[in-house]
């Protein structure tokens, strides 16, 4: 498989939202980007704040830009001033499009090729990420 289809992207979003409801989370915004960082699908639940739209997309975009889940970026950010400076520089270079918080997760095929990324925002970042992980695996993709 070389491309994430619209049907698959919508399936992932539905699974993220279902996982969030199972966890009694607040409303979420969920973005799915293709491997070229273009928005493939997006949903914003009723009641989610307007800025969560950009946060969800930035989480997915940052995962693609750095070829790693944003939880790894968050971990790097806590490793000291040099790593903080690096991530701050990335944000300056990209107009603030990288958010070093969990919730941006790469979607991979069985051969480990990156097909896209999913970003979720609205709950605690670790919970956003858990919902995304559950959705990606439920849709039959690798993390």
Image (cartoon, rainbow, N blue to C red):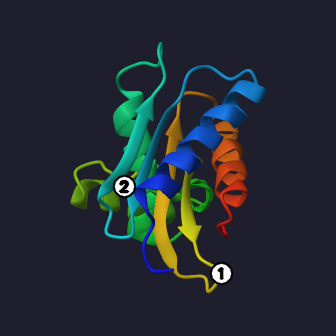
Question: In x, y percent, where is residue 64?
Answer: 42, 66
Foreground disc of the pair 2, 1: 1
Where residue 88 is drawn, which disc sits there? 2
Mark 1 element type = loop
Instruction: Name the one closer to the observer, 109 or 130.
Output: 109
Q: Which residue is mark 1?
A: 110
**Residue pictured at 57% horizontal, 53% vertical:** 74
Compared with 30, 44 (above or below) is above
Compared with 135, 25 (above or below) is above
Q: Residue furthest bottom?
A: 111
**Residue pictured at 48% horizontal, 60% vertical:** 117
Q: Residue furthest front?
A: 7
Q: How many marks?
A: 2
Question: In x, y percent, where is residue 20?
Answer: 68, 31
**Residue pictured at 45% horizontal, 49% vertical:** 59
Question: In x, y percent, where is residue 30?
Answer: 48, 39
Q: Is residue 59 left or right of residue 79?
A: left
Instruction: Name the one closer to the observer, 105 or 113.
Output: 113
Q: Is residue 4 left or right of residue 129?
A: left
Residue 101 visible to an observer of this rendering: no
**Residue pictured at 68% horizontal, 23% vertical:** 25
Where residue 65 is drawn, which disc sits there? none
Residue 89 visible to an observer of this rendering: yes
Which image quadrant: the C terminus?
bottom right
Mark 2 element type = helix
Please tell me how crowded label 2 is: few (under 14), some (14-19), or many (20+) other residues with Cα within 10 Å.
some
């Amino acid at each position: 498989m070389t491309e994430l289809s619209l049907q698959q992207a919508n399936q992932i979003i539905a699974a993220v939202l279902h996982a969030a409801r199972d966890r009694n989370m607040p409303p979420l915004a969920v973005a799915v980007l293709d491997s070229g960082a273009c928005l493939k699908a997006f949903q914003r639940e009723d009641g989610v704040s307007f800025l969560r739209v950009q946060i969800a997309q930035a989480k997915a975009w940052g995962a693609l830009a750095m070829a790693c889940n944003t939880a790894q970026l968050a971990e790097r950010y806590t490793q000291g001033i040099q790593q903080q400076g690096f991530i701050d520089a990335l944000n300056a270079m990209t107009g603030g499009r990288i958010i070093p918080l969990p919730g941006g997760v790469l979607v991979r095929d069985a051969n480990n090729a990156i097909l896209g990324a999913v970003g979720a925002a609205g709950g605690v970042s670790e919970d956003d990420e858990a919902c995304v992980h559950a959705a990606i695996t439920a849709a039959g993709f690798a993390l």
